[in-house]
Amino acid sequence: MRTARSQDRTLSGLISIVAFLSWLAVLSAPSVAVANPEHSRARQTGRKTSAHAPKKPTETVSPDPDILIRLQRSQSALESKANDLDAGIRQQANQLGREIEDSKKQTQQMLAATGKRIALTQRLSELIIALLVLLCAGILYIARRLTRLERKSFMSDMKLNQAKVETDEWQAGELPQG
């Protein structure tokens, strides 16, 4: 897609080149009359040429056919190159558009993969936290069970000691009071 600015630049460049070539063609034409040196000297000194001096016939400027042919060839070559450049620019613009689309697709795929990784990481962290909570709860449960077992064993040891004392007293012949 060509923008208006690039079209204006191309057109103004072509116009400038054609104008320059036309100017060269006019200057290089052999039919251009050379200025009369006497006439220019008379103008500088303020003298007028005599009325009896024969005037040289003025030649009309007719374009040289070879110059016109060269100018047309140059113009067609320029137009051909401008068209080639235009086609090249269009092709590069299309290729750039395709590359942008490919890049956009790759970016979307990478974003989707990153989103999946984030979701997986979040689930894994939730699982780890749940396992840590369960581990802490298990440790607390075991600690409470151990303290209960210790109390029970301490109580049973006390009961055994008391029962032993009572047995010893009974064997000794002393009866418990109570």
Image (tube, rainbow, N blue to C red):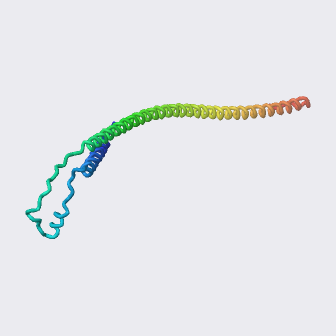
Is 153 situated above or below 43?
Answer: above
**Quadrant position of residue 93:** top left
Asked whether, in this view, residue 68 is left or right of residue 42, the answer is right
| Residue 5 x %, y % | 30, 44
Which residue is found at the position 18% from the left and 67% from the top?
Answer: 41
Question: For this rendering, which residue is in front, 84 or 54?
Answer: 54
| Residue 131 x %, y % | 63, 32
Asked whether, in this view, residue 125 is left or right of residue 84, the answer is right
**Quadrant position of residue 156:** top right
Which residue is found at the position 25% from the left and 52% from the top?
Answer: 27
The N terminus sits in image quarter: top left
| Residue 52 x %, y % | 8, 62
Asked whether, in this view, residue 104 is left or right of residue 117, the answer is left
Q: Residue furthest right?
A: 172
| Residue 139 x %, y % | 68, 34
The C terminus sits in image quarter: top right
Question: For this rendering, which residue is in front, 29 or 88?
Answer: 29
Which residue is found at the position 32% from the left and 41% from the top?
Answer: 78
Question: For this rendering, which residue is in front, 6 or 24?
Answer: 24
Q: Residue furthest bottom?
A: 45
Question: For this rendering, which residue is in front, 160 or 48?
Answer: 48
Asked whether, in this view, residue 172 is left or right of residue 40, the answer is right
**Quadrant position of residue 161:** top right
Is 58 situated above or below 2?
Answer: below
Total residue callouts: 0
